[in-house]
Amino acid sequence: MKYIFILIFLITYCSWGLELGYTTSSPLWTHLTYMFQHSGIMHLTINSVAFIIVFHGLQKILNVWTIVILMLLCGFAASFLSMYDIPTVGASSMIYAMIGLDIGLTLFCRQIRIANTRRYLLFLFCLVFTLLVSLLKQNSNFFIHLYSLILGVIVSLPLSSRKG
């Protein structure tokens, strides 16, 4: 499934422009399509690699369709909390939502066991670093990242009693 998303990212990138991104005045459907478009080849590449890695990790604990539905819902909802006049595009919201799911399932629900505390702390440090970079980078929508992460943690909480 994760590779189908990457294929969709590639097709979308090659076929459409930033009109798929959402703004303060864009149509409702752009709050879904923005997640599949990217602003450049480097943006597409970094998000695709991150998407594969994070999705792969979550597949070990959650059903694929649960991941897909929750990351899309979190990205969709977060888009209404962080609107700007310039278009927002990218799969980052889905990635941060999946990271939020992982953090929620690890720290709050205890569904995922931390095998190496140092590595997990390094992961959290890198997460904070990427959020700070997003905050300082003017063409990045920091709040979509932050809200997607928070929503991912929130939606993970009811999953604590479920397996797969």
Image (tube, rainbow, N blue to C red):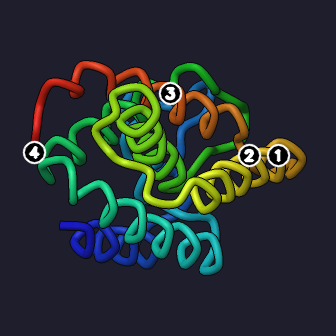
**Residue carrying label 4:** 164
**Residue carrying label 2:** 128
Q: Amino acid at mark 2?
A: Val
Name the residue: 63% across, 26% down.
Answer: 82
- Which tag, 3 or 2, sits closer to the chain's start? 3
Residue 44 against residue 147 in the figure, above or below: below
Crowding at mark 4 (Cα within 10 Å: few <14, some 14-19, many 20+): few
Q: Nearer the viewer, residue 28 or 50?
A: 50
Residue 64: x and y, percent? 15, 53
Labels 2 and 1 touching (C-beta < 8 A): yes
- Which tag, 1 or 4, sits closer to the chain's start? 1
Crowding at mark 3 (Cα within 10 Å: few <14, some 14-19, many 20+): many
Find residue 66 and report its image quarter: top left
What's the mark number on residue 91? none
Residue 5: x and y, percent? 29, 66
Q: Amino acid at mark 1?
A: Leu
For label 1, the SS is helix
- Which tag, 4 or 3, sits closer to the chain's start? 3
Instruction: Measure the alpha-carbon separation of dots 3 and 1.
Output: 18 Å
What's the mark number on residue 78? 3
Residue 116: x and y, percent? 52, 60
